[in-house]
Image (spheres, rainbow, N blue to C red):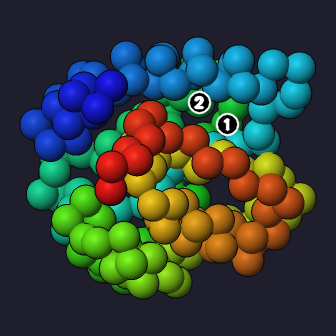
Amino acid sequence: MQQLMTLFKFRNKAELAPLLATQLAAHLRLCYQGQPMPDCIVAVPMTQHAWRQRGFHQTALLARYLSAVLQVPYIAGGLRKIRSVPMQHMASQSARWENSKRSQLALHDFSGSTVAVVDDVLSTGATMMAAADALYKKGAAAVDAWAVVYNQHD
């Protein structure tokens, strides 16, 4: 999965999104077996600069496919990056936590909702925590973290 993610994210292989989302959806169905899915899905945001550089918003693409497969509404633009941070895969663990603090803003009212945040790779959890903090400030009752790859080597 890590090799596929590298192709998807750094080699502009957006066509891998359906495959990656389908694999994650199969895993999530097992995880949520007998329990309700979240009320909605949001994607970890990226800056406009990073979006233009990459050519597509990989987490939003994954979130859209997951929404369709799992029949859970996707809230496009639910989170916004409010300040630029260095590329997380290039930063140390402590720098990732410091860089991510207060870097995101929730743009919708999520009062009482359970929100699933989609990211491509989860390493330290710093980006997810920033997303969760923003969502809780906008009323989310619970935040679930969904990622295609867990990179425990970072």
Task: Let me know if residue 117 appears in the view.
Answer: yes
Relative placement, left or right, of 5 versus 80 is left
Residue placed under numbered mark 1 in the picture: 73
* Left or right placement of residue 80 versus residue 68 in this view: left
Tell me residue 7's x, y (percent): 17, 31
* Residue beneath the point at 70% across and 43% down: 40
N-terminal label among 1 and 2: 2
Quadrant position of residue 48: bottom left
Instruction: Using the numbered discs, state the Cα–Cα distance from disc 1 to disc 2 in whole angstroms.
Output: 6 Å
Q: Residue at x 37, y 16 (%)?
A: 19
User: Regarding mark 2 in the picture, which secondary structure is present there?
Assistant: helix
Give the amino acid type for the residue marked by disc 1 in the picture: Pro
The answer to whether 84 is drawn above or below residue 36 in the figure is below
CB atoms of marks 1 and 2 within 8 Å: yes
Where is residue 37 shown, x and y percent of the image? Answer: 78, 32
Percent across and percent down for residue 80 are 47, 68
For the point 69% across and 19% down, the residue is 29
Vertical position of residue 82 compared to residue 135: above or below? below
Q: Mark 1: few, some, or many residues within 10 Å (few <14, many ≥20)?
A: some
Residue bearing the label numbered 2:
67
Of the 4 image quadrants, the one containing the C terminus is bottom left
Tally of numbered discs: 2
Crowdedness of circle 2 by 10 Å Cα count: few (<14), some, many (20+)? some
Instruction: Compare residues 92 and 50 and report the one nearer the observer.
Output: 92
Question: Which quarter of the rendered picture does the N terminus lie within?
Answer: top left
Compared with 136, 125 (above or below) is: above
- Name the amino acid, label 2: Ser
Residue at 44%, 41% (x, y): give it.
Answer: 150
Query: Dot 1 lies on which element?
Result: loop
